[in-house]
Image (cartoon, rainbow, N blue to C red):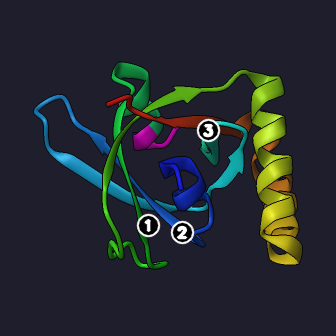
Amino acid sequence: MDEIARLGTEKYLLLTTFRKDGRAVPTPVWAAPDGDALLVWTVADSGKVKRIRRSGAVRLAPCTARGTATGQEVAGHAELLDDAGSARARTVIASRYGLVGRLVMLGSTLRRGRTGTVGIRLTVAAG
């Protein structure tokens, strides 16, 4: 099983981004498989978005809802998506997480609008 397929079966994904000084900042997120990548959705002005904008280097691992890693971590790359890609990420995640996913997406859209969140495409580093 490849890494995207393995990580895509997990309920939560530990997305670790890195500050300028190299310190790791792990965050548990929902993720959904989309072809050869995973899609994540988050608030557009979050710290992880700022760190990804600066450097797309990330680490990915399965985790609990509280962010405790439960499996092997792998190196990856994150890319912020445009409006269409972000809309796709919201749709794919809402579908993966069922009624709860759809309700969370609806609440987020009502609270922040369509541009208040952004999709992130995650791939596993080659090697």
Sequence-wise, the earlier of marks 3 and 2 is 2
Q: Which residue is mark 3?
A: 37
The C terminus - image quarter: top left
Sequence-wise, the earlier of marks 1 and 2 is 2
Q: Which residue is mark 2?
A: 12
User: How many C-alpha atoms fall within 10 Å of the one at disc 3: few (<14), some, or many (≥20)?
Assistant: many
Q: Which residue is mark 1?
A: 62
Is 52 left, or right, of 118 in this rendering? left
Label 2 element class:
strand
Can you tell which of label 3 and label 2 is closer to the viewer?
Answer: 3
Residue located 86% across and 49% down the image: 91
Three-letter residue code for mark 3? Ala
Figure check: 43 above or below 49: below
Q: Is residue 45 magenta?
A: yes
Residue located 48% across and 43% down the image: 46
Residue 61's image quarter? bottom left
| Alpha carbon separation for disc pair 3 and 2 | 15 Å
Three-letter residue code for mark 1? Pro
**The magenta stretch spans which residues?**
44-48
Label 3 element class:
strand
